[in-house]
Amino acid sequence: MKLTFLGTGAGLPSRNRNVSSLILKLLDESNEMWMFDCGEGTQHQLLKTTLKPRKVSKIFITHLHGDHLYGLPGFLASRGFQGGENDTLTLYGPRGLGDYIRVSHQVSQTHLNYKIKVVELGRDSGIAFENEQYKVTYGLLNHGIRCYGYRVEEAAHPGELLIDKARAAGVPNGPLLGKLKQRERITLADGTILDGNDFVGPDQPGHIVTIFGDTRYHKPALPLIQDADVLVHEATYAGNEATLAHQHFHSTAKQAAMMAKAGNVKQLYLNHISARYLGRDVQQLQRDAQSIFKHSTVVKDFDEFTIK
């Protein structure tokens, strides 16, 4: 799993930061990518990367403010001309998302050459998507309009074959090793019976990634981030501007760090940075967060991180 940040700014584009969008790359796991929010200019940001729009199979919209949504009609229209015409694209988000897409396409006479499916999340929390490999839950945050955070949980990875132990037991190279890895019972040429469960290590937990939309400091959202490998949280304001952040339904860098610490997450990535913070001011945002939670990083456009 990798995270690529396409836009890390708040409210409106600036010279240094585009508005909100990021990609969760699942290319090694399932040969797909998931997009979270699609602010204005997202498709232009993609052109500056090696990412392929046709690989985007799901888009999760946190809320319907323009800086998280205005890039969606253009991205949807362009995707069909970039090799995505044979794959259904599923969009998740608050009520009204379907109307936004329908009206923008109707007024602009846009006709997609691929299927889209819109899943509107009408409840305060629940499961947005689940299959054998992933589970995506969502929960309500504290913003001026309905806004969600998403928690992506990957299924556990099967344990690794204890190859040295198998060889010591006399298992030859070939199909018998494969059967052992599947935890099957095998019989060696000399009649020895081995149980595959004795030659496979324990299952390894899958990754957990939580991506928040805009929000005030909001303790009720802690279950979404509990024990996550990565938390992406907005940090629109500096640590000493808590009153201003509250008035505008946003968080400070310190408040984001407080959430990360309380949720026992491993890594915090701070985005949705106000355009008034440049250079040293951005460094101060990071210091604000790190004073509370050491593993805090203020991200910038096109940063990419492997989720360990």
Image (tube, rainbow, N blue to C red):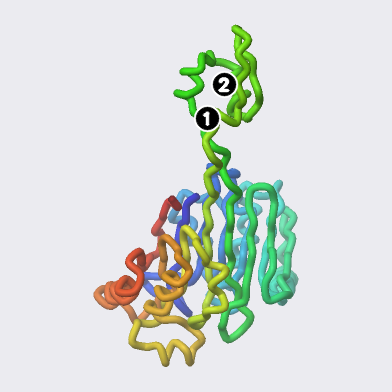
User: Can the viewer see residue 6?
Assistant: no
Residue 128, located in which quarter of the rendered image? bottom right
Specify whether 263 is left or right of 118: left
Disc 1 secondary structure class: loop
Residue 139 horizontal/vertical position (percent): 62, 72
Is residue 281 depicted above or below 58 in this figure?
A: below
Disc 2 secondary structure class: helix
Q: Which residue is mark 2?
A: 177
Residue at image point 60% right, 73% down: 148
Please name whichever residue, 151 or 57, is drawn nearer the observer in this view of the structure: 151
Residue 32 horizontal/vertical position (percent): 59, 48
User: Can the viewer see residue 164?
Assistant: yes
Is residue 280 depicted above or below 129 in this figure?
A: below
- Determine the CA span between mark 1 and mark 2: 8 Å
Mark 2: few, some, or many residues within 10 Å (few <14, many ≥20)? many
Quick one: label 1 or label 2, which is nearer the N terminus?
1
Amino acid type for the residue under numbered disc 2: Leu
Asked whether the beta carbons under mark 1 and mark 2 sit within 8 Å of each other, the answer is: yes
Residue 183 horizontal/vertical position (percent): 63, 30
Q: Residue furthest top?
A: 190
* Label of residue 17 in the image: none
Total numbered labels placed on residues in the image: 2
Q: Which residue is mark 1?
A: 161
Mark 1: few, some, or many residues within 10 Å (few <14, many ≥20)? many
Amino acid type for the residue under numbered disc 1: Leu
